[in-house]
Image (cartoon, grey):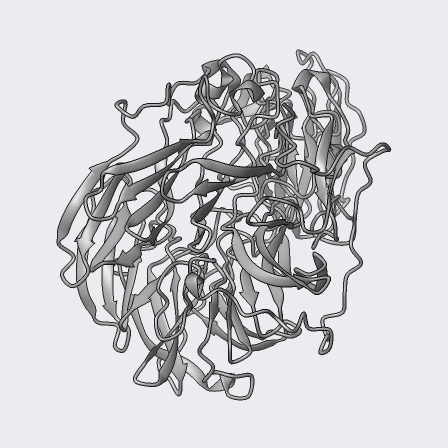
Amino acid sequence: MDRRRFLAGAAGVTAGAAALSIPTAARADVKDGLALPVPRQPDAFGEAGRDYPKVCGNLANTNHSTLKRITPRNVKQLGGAWHVNLEGGSTASPQQSTCVVQDGVIYVQTTQQNVFAVDGRTGRIKWKTNLGTKTTNMRGVAVARGLVFSTSGANIVYALNKDTGAIVWQKQLMTEGETGGSDSGCDPSNGQCGGLTGTLAGAIVYWDGLIYVGMQGSTGGARGRAYALDAATGEIAWIFWSAPGEGQFGNDTWEGDSWKTGGAVPWIHPAIDPELGLVYWTFGGSYPRLDGSSRGGDNLFANSIVALDAKTGKRKWHFQSVHHDIWDLDNVMAPVLIDIKIDKRVRKAVVYGSKVGMFYILDRTSGEPLHGMEERPVPQDERQKTSRTQPFPGGEPFIPQAPRFDNATRPVPFYAWGGLYTPHWDRATIIFPGAGGGGDWTHLSFNPETGWIYVGYGLINSGFSNSRDGRVNTSRPLGEYFAGGIAAVDPRTNKPVWTLDREWSLAHGNGILTTAGRVMFQGGPDGVLHAMDDTNGDILWSFQCGAGVHTSPVSYEIDGEQYIAVFAGGNGLPYPDIPRGDHLWAFKLGGTVPPAPAPVPPKKRNDIRVAAVNGTTVTLGRVWDNAAQRPGAKENTVAQNAMSPQHLRVPVGTTVTFVNPADNAYAHAAVSFFEYEFDSGVLMPGQSFTHTFDTPGEFFYNDAIFPQNTGKIVVY
């Protein structure tokens, strides 16, 4: 059976070379052309109005509030209603938990493993419950049946009393006693082994007596699984193994026993259609992430959306967006369920994706592509056992699918580079969209007032290699620039209505909230929360929250007053220096609490962060021995830091000598990129080059022969 044919009559393979589809950037002054009328959405999805009952608003993950008191005309009157530091002002941990609001109370977690109930009117902490000390990403609770459900870093699911925070029950997951085969272990020779069994991840979702819990850990060889638990007791109702074991559907898409450490983890929460009784879950990439040589086949259900019977976990249909992934293009975003009218017919749709910069819009009853699907031939590398074709949906991508030289995707020189699905092996290769590009895990919004899907995107390249023999996943080449933007996509055509490149990457948890008042909200890595016009993305109001915003804003109502709330605590990706904190904010019209002091924003270039060394000589092809404060004794051609020292600091007027030691085996070079300050040319072993720095600044350079070897010289 062809595992790609997820239903009879599925899109077939077409001949011809794979073309890179690059949309024309649309003007953001669109006032006409709204995707209207929008069919009435199913009542069973629920809605976010007075309450914001779950992460992404409702069971369909539409991230839309029906509240409309805040409008483009009065949004400038927004101010802080209240502010609280949940962890005493700590800046030690990033925060990814989106708030849930019920009956005027906000429920939110911290990475420090505390769950809080906060009065939505005043910011007073009603209760706080600690769930242990083993930290992990926390992305949101579920609230139902008088309980608050949370995961913990120790892989325990907790049910807490909604009014007091007292623990009602707890359930340990990720245990050896779970059936389904091996769930741990990995190959230490591949350079990515962490020996992980995985950790629980993603916001919890409640529906009809069950809670749905995901997990992460594909980078360490965990075998993916999705859980449904009885909300009353915590007992496991079912487990769906996303790297299928022997005798399970899809096992034959994994070479040998590679399924045992296959990854394919569901690290973002699902959507649920109560009328169809289906839960829609997305699953991450395969393990090893960048080396496909040991796991031939399509590797189901990695890089897939799977529709499961919500009560039994039985697979109803699946769609795989990337076959045999070797690029970490896992497309794990919370899927969005919408009813849309296509060709005068109302269709039940699920919007899926996407790191690859395009949406896969499928019939949620059957998995049928609503805009067609073409399996296009793509470039091949036999060593990687690459898939012959990859699926391309009808419509257009919302971002380009290859690096460009007029924005942040300009590739660092001397790397091999290419567009989507360019293969790699032992030579670091840059592609865009990369592992942090496209949509990544930002939470989308479907706005029935415009009929559009909104997505935050990243303009971030990745540089891939197979991680063997000391090579690293240079997933963000040193010295490259970072940026991003926001796009509005018409789901009736799967084409962008407009795209807006902006200052920051907006693809890592920077969720978008739309409202019936026609104002939408999104925060960024610099800590600024923006209110925007939903027709064109124009910024109407901004507020500094004190730390990066990598959660979704929410809206709720108390006594007729509309509030906006957001948890601002920063993140570790894609910028390593995103300001962190523990700021829980609420805003209302006429609010008087002033903004937080602006933190130091992240650097817009992937910086070299090792301590600076004072000196006048750089040794090429050597890793700096920090203890001895001198170049290492052995040549290195694969490390990113094989410049000694990697970070040099000199005064203006200094002459620096670049040396290729005589006992090196290879030629090397040192070339300043983007600033083009110097170029050593090819230096054979024993040769050197000098350059005098007459201008202050930061100058990144790399080795033209081994380009991942990168250094920086700061001239003051």
Q: Is residue 666 left or right of residue 615?
A: right
Q: Considering depth in this image, is 241 or 294 the residue closer to the camera?
A: 241
Q: Position of residue 485 (x, y in %)?
A: 63, 60
- The relative height of residue 518 versus residue 178 in the rendered view (above or below) is below
Q: Position of residue 662 (x, y in %)?
A: 69, 13
- The relative height of residue 35 versus residue 132 in the rendered view (above or below) is below
- The relative height of residue 321 versus residue 336 in the rendered view (above or below) is above
Residue 246: quadrant of the picture: top left
Q: Is residue 106 left or right of residue 286?
A: left
Q: Position of residue 626 (x, y in %)?
A: 46, 28
Q: Considering depth in this image, is 408 or 163 the residue closer to the camera?
A: 163
Note whether residue 502 is visible.
no
Q: Position of residue 461 (x, y in %)?
A: 66, 42
Image quadrant for the N terminus?
A: top right
Residue 323: quadrant of the picture: top right
Circle count: 0
Q: Considering depth in this image, is 703 or 496 the residue closer to the camera?
A: 496
Note whether residue 573 is visible.
yes
Which residue occupies 62% across, 68% down? 451
Q: Is residue 465 left or right of residue 402?
A: left
Q: Considering depth in this image, is 358 or 251 the residue closer to the camera?
A: 251
Q: Is residue 505 left or right of residue 26?
A: left
Which residue occupies 62% across, 49% down? 362
